[in-house]
Image (spheres, rainbow, N blue to C red):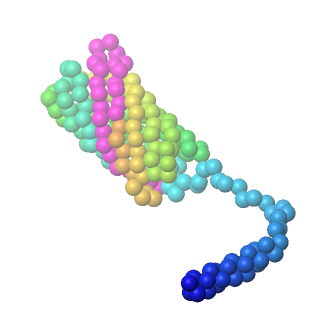
Amino acid sequence: MRMIGTTVLAALATALTMGGALASDVLTVSTSTAPVAAVPVHDVPSYDWSGFYAGIFTGVQTGADRGTQYGLGVGAGVNVAFDFYLVGAEVTVQGVAGDVGESSYGQILGRAGLIVNDDLAIYAAGGYGIDLGAPDAEDYLMGAGVELMLNDSVSFRAQYLHGFPATSDGEDRNQFTLGASYHF
């Protein structure tokens, strides 16, 4: 019993000394008028989408009369980025071969899209395409794509374009391409 009494008294003495120290602390309120740092809404992108680029691509074109054609091509273009908007233009030429023989196909495209995050952009594309071999064919092109920056200079893209015939004797065509570009 004596041990219990000693333990209770020790605990009570400890509580009283702590309670007294807490009760004697002065409550202070800061009246500082230091400016609050602004939180950035949009970070500066780590990749610069603006400027010239050149690259290579491979693809598949399909059409009712031409069947399936496989191609390998080169392209060059320019992009301009405004905040998170992206606009640009490019010219491409590709050699295609398939069910109806070999040919080459050129196109001029305009692109407009959004920079989703530092390294990813989605875009719509539209323009004009022409079959440079026989038979002659001209197309109005519409489509979309996605482009991923792999590092400061190299990007990878996937793109789909639908070709609407510019003449009455033409045919619709679909084009799927994968490519890589070097940004200067």
Looking at the picture, how far across and down is residue 151, in whole percent?
42, 58
Q: Nearer the viewer, residue 146 or 90?
A: 146
Could you tell me which quadrant the N terminus lies in?
Answer: bottom right
Residue 143 vertical placement versus 65 (above, below): below
Q: Which of 144 and 2 is in front in this view?
A: 2
Q: How many marks?
A: 0
> In this image, 184 relative to 41: left or right?
left
Residue 149 vertical placement versus 158 (above, below): below
- The residue that appears at 38% across and 27% down in the rendered structure is 141
Q: Does the magenta stretch include residue 155?
A: no
- The residue that appears at 79% across and 72% down in the rendered structure is 23
The part of the image, by quadrant, that contains residue 164 is top left
Looking at the picture, how far across and down is residue 6, in whole percent?
61, 86
Whether residue 14 is visible here, answered yes or no, is: no
Whether residue 85 is visible here, answered yes or no, is: yes
The part of the image, by quadrant, that contains residue 134 is top left
The residue at the far front in this view is: 1
- The residue that appears at 50% across and 36% down in the rendered structure is 112
Magenta part, dominant SS: strand
Q: Is residue 165 magenta?
A: yes
> In this image, 99 relative to 126: left or right?
left
> In this image, 104 relative to 52: left or right?
left
Looking at the picture, how far across and down is residue 99, in whole percent?
14, 29
- The residue that appears at 83% across and 68% down in the rendered structure is 28
Q: Which of 89 and 84 is in front in this view?
A: 84
Residue 141 vertical placement versus 46 (above, below): above
User: What are the residue bounds of the magenta stretch?
Assistant: 160-184
Q: Nearer the viewer, residue 125 or 31?
A: 31
